[in-house]
Image (spheres, grey):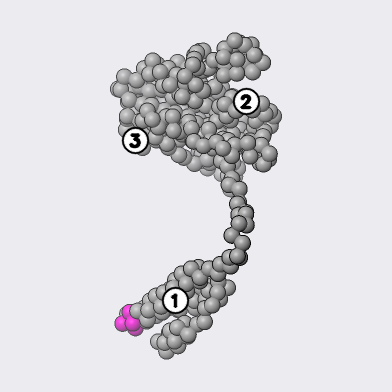
Amino acid sequence: MKDKIAKYLAEVQNENITDNHSLEQFRLKWLSRKGIIQSLMDEFKTISDPSQKREIGQLINQLKQTAQTIFDENKSRINSSVNVDISDDLSLELNLISQGSLHPLTIVKNQIISIFSKIGFVVSDGPEIEDDWHNFTALNTPPDHPARDMQDTFYIQPDSQDITQDIHLLRTQTSSIQIRVMENNTPPIRIICPGRVYRNETISARAHCQFHQVEGLYIDENVSFADLKTTLLYFAQEMFGKDTQIRLRPSYFPFTEPSAEVDISCTICGGKGCTVCKHTGWVEILGCGMVDPKVLDNCGISSRKYTGFAFGMGIERITMLKYRINDLRVFFENDLRFLNQFNNERV
């Protein structure tokens, strides 16, 4: 085997590399997973004599380092040798390649993250395929809870017929990220959780089977409903303008108590009444509430010591209001005529 490696060492040093094609052929021959060096490594594993194994291993490493050095040096040489042919006419126009734009949902998501980061919220992430505990049960929604009927869930079939196997699903809300954070951290906790969620709904101008949410959570001692209202007023005025007002209406969510729906004064008519706000002067943007003590206890956080608030909003909803878009489906069609309208948008 030593003779074979010595032969390969001489061969690799005599390789002729002239362009990108021959460079790639060199890589495939020597450095790829099916290359010569890898085959030597596979053969090396069969050696049982420790002293021989040490010597052979050093020779293989020398060959590998030599091949890698030759590859890197030639790659650098080829990439730097750019042939430029400039004509005598220097007044020729330059053909600029147009720059793409961010998707409007990405623009608004980044704006939301930026707004909340200014008051101490940090971004947390989690899996889109969730288990029943994090998506439902820990959020005060046990198997027989009627609130499960509020969401038509995409369940993932298990590989076997074993009914004891954990139930998995496509998450219906990014609240599952909040549970994971609370299980693994001690208060104070101040997070926002942006991400894609899924619900088995008929696609229309107002609904889709996949959409995007940003949920927020603040857990600490002596957190009050007034803190929640102040936070949401700050967000509304940062996102929609300093003159924006909010109102909170009583609502129900299984994981918050009390719960509320949040409306903002219509950005189209200024609260005077129009078709967008259905002549009420108000438009709903999100849901919120104080974290139910049962949810804190489920995550190992003392509900006697800590309180907190949570809120959640659909990014599509905020984007439609911000840019006056009346059909949610355009966000998923990738129509360049629509997307090019956001070329000049920046976060």
Type of the residue with mark 1: Ile
Q: Toward which corner of the image does residue 230 lie, by quadrant?
A: top left
Say left or right for 205 vs 251: right
Going from N to C along the chain, the mark reached first, 3 or 1, is 1
* Residue drawn where x is 57% and y is 26% of the image: 322
| Marks 3, 1: nearer the viewer | 1
Query: Residue 77 appears at what percent x and percent y?
Result: 47, 72
Location of mark 1 (residue): 70
Measured as percent of width and height from the top left, residue 64 is found at 42, 76
Q: Residue at x 64, y 28 (%)?
A: 325
Circle 2/circle 1 CB separation < 8 Å: no
Tell me which segment is drawn in magenta. Answer: 51-55
Question: Which residue carries the number 3 mark?
Answer: 185
Residue 39: in sight, yes or no?
no
288 vs 283, nearest the viewer: 283
Is residue 4 magenta-colored?
no
Amino acid under disc 3: Asn
Q: Would you name the residue on which mark 2 appears? A: 324
Q: CA distance from mark 3 to mark 1?
A: 49 Å
Say if 270 sits above or below 68 in the image.
above
Q: Residue at horizontal 59%, vertical 45%?
A: 100
Q: Give the foreground label among 3 and 2.
A: 2
Name the quadrant containing residue 70: bottom left
What mark, if any, has residue 153 been given in the picture? none
